[in-house]
Amino acid sequence: MTSHQSTQTMKPATAAKKLGVYLEATPAEFREGVVTRAELNALQADPPQWLRDLRRDGPHPRPVVAQKLGVSIAGLARGGVTEALTTEQIEALKQDQPEWLQKERATQAEVRKETARLKARDAEQS
């Protein structure tokens, strides 16, 4: 009895998330089809120009925006940022340092500090 190896596919939204890009900014042929695991691996290994441009200039999805600003996704929402931002917009926010961004960065720093404290405590107890 032979077993058939089925090709793993994913929705474009899943592939965009794995690639770290905003789905709505991807080419139509990417958004309208399905992506196989092999195609995803090929895109990651040798990204085409459109993917390199998206990763460099955006628009970026919220998780990437949050990471670039050093805040949480919830912090973005509290700051009123609900849409994808370009690299230029992110850099402008970093330069302007609005009050909400300063507050959310401080909150994120406290969260990291507490996480490190708990990790050290747990390591001591082990």
Image (spheres, grey):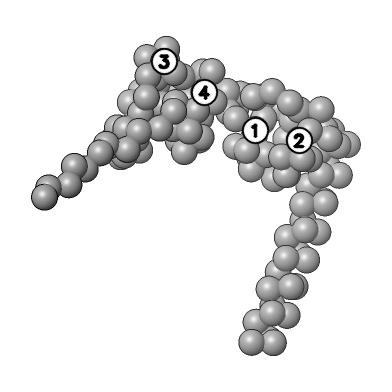
**The residue tagged with tag 3: helix, strand or loop?**
helix
Nearest-to-viewer mark from 4 and 3: 3
Whether residues under marks 1 and 3 lie with C-beta atoms below 8 angstroms apart, the answer is no
The residue under label 2 is 76
Instruction: Indicate which disc, 4 or 1, sits on the residue closer to the N terminus.
Output: 4
What number of labels is visible?
4
Q: Position of residue 104 (x, y in %)?
A: 81, 44
Q: Position of residue 44 (x, y in %)?
A: 35, 38
Q: Front-most of 29 and 80?
A: 29
Q: Indicate the amino acid at tag 1.
A: Arg
Q: Residue at x 17, y 47 (%)?
A: 3
Give the alpha-carbon distance from disc 2 to disc 1, as whole Å. 8 Å
- Taking the view exactly as shown, the residue that stands out farthest to the left is 1
The residue under label 4 is 23
The residue under label 1 is 62
Give the alpha-carbon distance from disc 3 to disc 2, as whole Å. 29 Å
Q: Residue at x 37, y 14 (%)?
A: 29
